Image (spheres, rainbow, N blue to C red):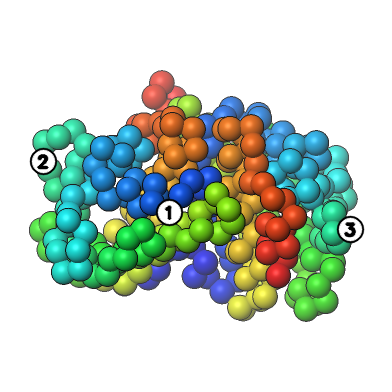
Amino acid sequence: MSKFVYVTYIYTTPRKVWDAITKPEFARRYWLHYNISDWKKGSPWEHQHGDDSGKIMIDGTVLESDPPHRLVTTWTRPDKSKEPSRVTYDIAEYNTGLVCLTVTHDQLEGDEAMAASVSGGWPKVLSNLKSFLETGKSENIWLAKNKEGQ
Amino acid sequence: MTMANSSFVYVTYIRAPQQKVWDALTKPEFQKQYWFGGHQESTWKKGAEWKMFMPQHGLTDSGEILESDPPNRVVIKWRNEFRPELKEEGYSRCTMELATENELTKLSITHTIDKENAQFIQAVSGGWPRILSSLQSFLETGTAHGDTRTVAQKAHK
């Protein structure tokens, strides 16, 4: 698989979606991990583990930045063992009060394991983002499937 | 997810019990609240007829329940009935799978048709994210995606 696309509609504003993706204090509530950058074109960005160990899970470069509507970054394994892929966030007001968020993760041809991982991960992250923005509540989406171990 | 030329897959995690998600998917009184006014008629038993109605179009889709295992899984043989170019493409197969993961219900929709680059799959690829986002809002907040009319009109373009 070379491309993963996910569309979700959220009762919120484009600015709140932008902030939820780019600001650690929001991202840690629903992504549990968070993203660090000044979000200017050409700047580096890092996806850091939410345990505050400073562990960098993913990094890359900001390719496009048009707050609060569009953000494009490379998505690179920190050990650079595979070709980077690319993530595009498009944030558009669809109806009054309803935002359409489209996440496109492409250029995954060179990293099948990453393609499989992000295809499972994005639905969790983006469903939890919607819950967080609409209700203020979220879940630990990275828990094992069933905490009773059944 | 929209990459496959005749298949659409969408996964969402909803903060609600699995039985409530199942009921929202299968009962008209719930469907009408989040499916932009539309509803479906079926007994949801294997072999039963299945029909979908939208307020502005009447009958829009019909078919048959191929598999049913409440509240875990249902498979619908599904054909569009009101857009000739979609009806012409014949029957699709829609699988809805539900699973409990901790406090969440994982809902997976897989909609496939035996045709390359099917217009039908293109149409449902636009519709499912709207419907399932509305479902998630409905179950988590009690309010589905409003201005039903406007959203429904866009969904059927």
Q: Residue at x 33, y 35 (%)?
A: A29
**Residue lying at the far front of the rendered structure:** A96
Q: Which residue is mark 3?
A: B58
Query: Alpha carbon of mark 2 to alpha carbon of mark 3: how far?
Result: 56 Å
Q: Is residue B111 above or below residue A144?
A: below
Query: Alpha carbon of mark 1 to alpha carbon of mark 3: how far?
Result: 35 Å
The percent position of residue A39, horizontal first and vertical second, equals: 21, 59
Q: Residues within 10 Å of mark 1 (few under 14, many from 20)?
A: many
Q: Amino acid at mark 2?
A: Gly
The percent position of residue A77, horizontal first and vertical second, equals: 17, 58
Q: Are marks 1 and 3 on the same chain?
A: no
Q: Quadrant of the C terminus of chain B?
A: bottom right
Chain letter for mark 2: A
Q: Are marks 2 and 3 on the same chain?
A: no
Query: Can you see residue A87?
Result: no
Query: Alpha carbon of mark 2 to alpha carbon of mark 1: how far?
Result: 29 Å
Q: Amino acid at mark 1?
A: Pro
Q: Which residue is mark 1?
A: A14
- Callout 1 secondary element: helix
